[in-house]
Image (cartoon, rainbow, N blue to C red):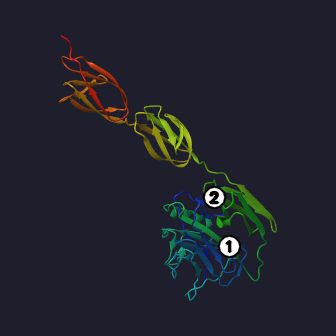
Amino acid sequence: MRKLLLAVLGLGAALAQEINPQGIIVNPVPTDLEVQVWVDKDPAKRGNAVYRIGESIYIYVRVNQDAYVYLFNINADGRIDPILPNPYERDNFLRAGETRRFPPEGARYRYTITGPEGEDRILAVASRRPLSVAEILDVERGEVRVQGWEGLARALSIVVKPVPARDWVTDVARYYVGRGEAPPPAEATLEVDSSPRGAEVYVDGGREGRTPLSLAVRPGRHEVELRLPGYAPYRAAVNARPGERVRVFARLVPLPREGTLVLEARPEGAEVYVDGRLVGRAPLSLSLEAGLHEVRLLAPGYAEYRARVEVRPEETLRLSVELVPLRATLEVYVNVEARVFLDGEEVGRTRGGYLRLEAPFGEHELTLVAPGYRTLVQTLQVSGDRVLRFQMVPLRR
């Protein structure tokens, strides 16, 4: 019977996928979705489990959130066997916190090691939504249509392309196939730390935990990646020798957190407040921390302008504001019928000695004209509703 060992857990990403030098597909976007895959002889995922040809093997997988899981076993010679889904296990949906074993108790099939000798790997892909794997996986026949790590990784990178960012993740388990009692490979110790701490640590594409972290690794070259929201990913390659302790320390670099707000207003000179603080007068340009901000503009004689804007990192937001003049109601009473002018423009005639009109806040010149009466001119300071009473004087004959 063929040797099947490979788990694919929750995929999900709209951004470009990465394929590391060992052909493992990796989501470059930090995500809170996690998947873990391991074999029965290596629950600690040290990568030193040894299986003899003819021996049975059990694969375990667990997710921290509801996800669709896909498992594949990559043999030392590049052949790929499907673990999940398979002709006997088509349900690949796991609940949050669920651990599933393959084959399960009472299954009608089992996985037996057949060779060739060498290192085998199990790939797990987890996704919050089902993946369209029909082009690469024939579930009915239990066959994968691509071969080799790189071929599988490239095929999966196409499959996950439609999935939103942060909705998929991968993990890898390793084990060794040998005849007789082949000793496990010698180990080295990898110690990873960061500033700030709490960054997710990926070694050769598989998530190992968060900093600070110490773990056993096989001798040789390893790709180490640290991810922390708000910081640029950190990547390093290390070469570990048997019995050696390799230390990796990453001083993570914050991603740009500022954007630019360019604000213009009419009339110019309005006071500009951002989040309650006076920052200047329009027009102006200023740098702001990325996120939501409250913008207020104040100018005498104009209604207050208030808006909530979102500034994005390394982007410029342009805001153009036309302030609305404040207006007051003027009630004009005159002892005669008169034509009424405001700032040189006729605005109406009194009827029964009365006219109601509106005027913007500020200083205005009011003029009353009536046949046989002296023209009346008066300067007004309008800052609210007013009642105005005038007595026009007849011309002397």
Q: Position of residue 118 (x, y in %)?
A: 71, 74
Location of residue 247 (image quadrant): bottom right
Q: Earlier in the sequence, mark 1 or mark 2?
A: 1
State left or right for residue 302 relative to residue 103: left
- Callout 1 amino acid: Arg
Q: Position of residue 121 (x, y in %)?
A: 65, 72
Q: Left or right: 305 with respect to 31?
A: left
Q: Residue at x 78, y 62 (%)?
A: 246
Please say if the residues under marks 1 and 2 sit with CB atoms less than 8 Å apart.
Answer: no
The secondary structure type at the circle numbered 2 is loop
Of the 4 image quadrants, the one containing the N terminus is bottom right
Mark 2, other Cα within 10 Å: few <14 / some 14–19 / many ≥20? many
From the image, tell me which residue sits under label 2. Answer: 228
**Observer-nearest residue: 157 or 318?**
318
**Position of 307 compared to 257: left or right?**
left
> Residue 266, how many percent across, how many down?
42, 33
Instruction: Give the residue number, with chain letter if any, for mark 1.
Output: 174
Vertical comparison of 57 with 345: above or below: below
Tell me which corner region of the image, top left, top right, bottom left or bottom right, holds residue 334: top left
Can residue 76 be seen at all in this image of the molecule?
no
Going by the numbered disc 2, the residue's amino acid type is Leu
